Image: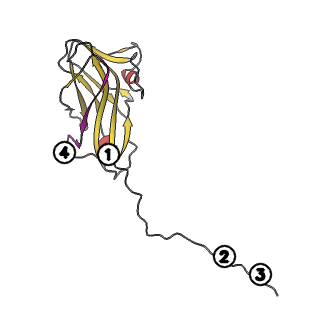
C-alpha cells in the first residue's frame, strides 16, 4: 500500500471561519505538513462550514484506490464540541458522522472506502473531480480550532506492466580482412 497526501490549495466561496494570524487565505493557514499551533482557522459558538479546494491527484488511471480519508488537527476550548468532515465529489455534500473534540490538538479523521456518490471504488478521476472538502462545526458551545487539514489517498502500488520482450543482446564479431 502507498499513500498520496493532498493539502488544500484554495478557499472556496465565503467562509464564516476566521483565521489566526488574521490575514491571508484560510487554506494557507492550515495547509502545512507540520503542525503549527500558532496559526489556525476557528469558529466560535455557531454551526458553520469551512470548504476548501484540493489539487488533482498525481495517480495514474488504473491504480486501485483503497480509500480516501480526510484528516484534521482540531480542538475546542469546550470539551465535547463536535465537527464532521464534508466531502463533495460531484456537487452533493457527503458528511462523516459527528466527531467529538477534546481541549488539545488531536488528529481527527474520517475514511470513505467507497465514493459516497455512487458506492463504487474510488478512481483517480473521482478524486480529480472533487468539488471541495472541509469540515463543519456541529454541537458547539465554545471555539473550535483547526490547525491542519489534509486528504490521504490510500492506493495499491501495482506491479510494473508485464512485457514479452526479451532483453536484446548484441554480439559483435569483428574480423580483420586482409587482401
**Residue 145 lies in magenta, yes or no?**
no
Q: Position of residue 142 (x, y in %)?
A: 23, 12
Instruction: Give the labeled residue for mark 1.
Output: 125
Q: Marks 1 and 4: CB-CB under 8 Å?
A: no
User: Which contiguous range is marked in magenta?
Assistant: 104-119
Judge from the rendering whether residue 98 lies leftward or rightward of residue 66; answer left or right: left
- The image position of residue 158, as x and y in percent, is 37, 54
Checking the image for residue 163, the label placed there is none
Identify the residue position indicated by label 2 in the image. Answer: 172
Quarter of the view holding residue 133:
top left
Q: Nearer the viewer, mark 3 or mark 1?
A: 3
Q: CA distance from mark 2 to mark 3?
A: 13 Å
Label 4, on which residue?
119
Residue 4 left/right relative to 108: right
* Residue at x-position 58% and y-position 72%: 169
User: How busy is the neighbourhood of tag 2: few (under 14 within 10 Å), some, or many (20 plus)?
Assistant: few
The secondary element bearing badge 3 is classed as loop
Q: Is residue 109 magenta?
A: yes
Q: CA distance from mark 2 to mark 4?
A: 60 Å
Residue 176 disc label: 3
Where residue 37 sits: x, y (%)?
Answer: 38, 18
Tell me the CA gap for discs 2 and 1: 49 Å
Tell me the residue at 52%/69% (across/down). 167
Amino acid at each position: 500500500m502507498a499513500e498520496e497526501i493532498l493539502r488544500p490549495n484554495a478557499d472556496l466561496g465565503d467562509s464564516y471561519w476566521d483565521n489566526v494570524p488574521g490575514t491571508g487565505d484560510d487554506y494557507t493557514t492550515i495547509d502545512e505538513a507540520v503542525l503549527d499551533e500558532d496559526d489556525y482557522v476557528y469558529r466560535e459558538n455557531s454551526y458553520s462550514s469551512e470548504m476548501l479546494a484540493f489539487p488533482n491527484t498525481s495517480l495514474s488511471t488504473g491504480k486501485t484506490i483503497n480509500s480516501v480519508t480526510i484528516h484534521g488537527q482540531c480542538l475546542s476550548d469546550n470539551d465535547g464540541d463536535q465537527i464532521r468532515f464534508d466531502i463533495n465529489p460531484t456537487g452533493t455534500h457527503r458528511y462523516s458522522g459527528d466527531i467529538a473534540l477534546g481541549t488539545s490538538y488531536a488528529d481527527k479523521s474520517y475514511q470513505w472506502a467507497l465514493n459516497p456518490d455512487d458506492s463504487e471504488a474510488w478512481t483517480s478521476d473521482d478524486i480529480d473531480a472533487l468539488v471541495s472538502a472541509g469540515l463543519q462545526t456541529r454541537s458547539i458551545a465554545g471555539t473550535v480550532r483547526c490547525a491542519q487539514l489534509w486528504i490521504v489517498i490510500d492506493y495499491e502500488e501495482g506491479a510494473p506492466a508485464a512485457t514479452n520482450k526479451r532483453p536484446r543482446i548484441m554480439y559483435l564479431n569483428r574480423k580483420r580482412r586482409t587482401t
